[in-house]
Image: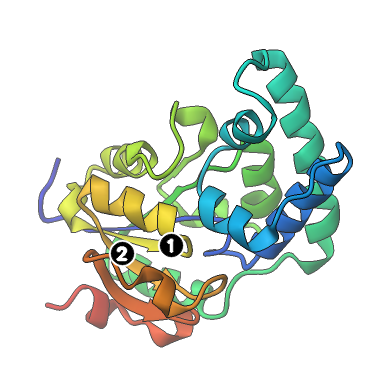
Amino acid sequence: MTATRRAFVFDMDGTIVDNMSFHTDSWIAFFKRRGMDIDADEFFRTTAGRQGKEIIRAHMGEDLLDHEVLELNLEKEAVYRELYEPHRKTVTGFDDLVEQARLRGVALAVATAAPNANIEFTLDGLDLRRHFDTVVGAADVARGKPHPDVFLLAAERCGVAPENCIVFEDAPLGVEAARRAGMRCVVLTTTLPAEAFAEFDNVIHIASDFSELTIDELFPA
């Protein structure tokens, strides 16, 4: 790796796009069809950043077969896309920050727990994939957040040392994954208030959206 190269690593859901309430709503609707009552706030706090297969097994049984988990996850994701499609857009200031980063030679990556269909739905649906040097998703790693795998793979693909990466996240499990990866983190309060991240020593900035951030502030000379 080239130690002097720098990178921004973006979580996708709740960070690039403000959609986590739609993910939670679709999970709640999915479980309700099966007679399961789930508290939405608690569900988000304990699952944001985990892969769909992990969430299904945790709530519906660890003994489910792989093909059963896949079918259930596909059903849930169809509900999500139906709910969110009319509202699909980037968080304020994202495009400007990405343009600044490109001009400064900062590598750009997406590291998400989303499956390929949702990555395509968001990144290709909004014509965003062209901005990124690499996109790492659920299909690329065995474990979701808070394990650091997805962030470490993104850094490796960009050729950037973890300590030279800044992660953008909206969920505590994602911030913890960045901490385990040895990466600093910027938190966006699109989903939870700043107080939810008080325990993390790798958080360098908390903002409501990207318009509050500049390259000089995040990567000072």
State the image coordinates of residue 175 (x, y, percent, origin top left).
36, 58
Marks 1,2: beta carbons within 8 A: yes
Residue carrying label 2? 185
Question: Above or below — where is 162 with respect to 45?
Answer: above
Say whether residue 34 is left or right of residue 186. Answer: right
Instruction: Tell me the quarter of the image containing the C terminus.
Output: bottom left
| Disc 1 from disc 2: Cα separation | 7 Å
Say whether residue 50 is left or right of residue 83. Answer: left
Count neighbours of disc 1 (C-alpha within 10 A) and say few if under 14, some if 14 to 19, many if 20 or more: many
Question: Above or below — where is 220 with respect to 82?
Answer: below
Disc number placed over residue 169 in the picture, else none: 1
Question: Above or below — where is 15 with respect to 23?
Answer: below
Tally the marks: 2
The three-letter amino acid code for the residue at tag 2 is Cys
State the image coordinates of residue 159 (x, y, percent, origin top left).
23, 42
Instruction: Tell me the quarter of the image containing the N terminus.
Output: top left
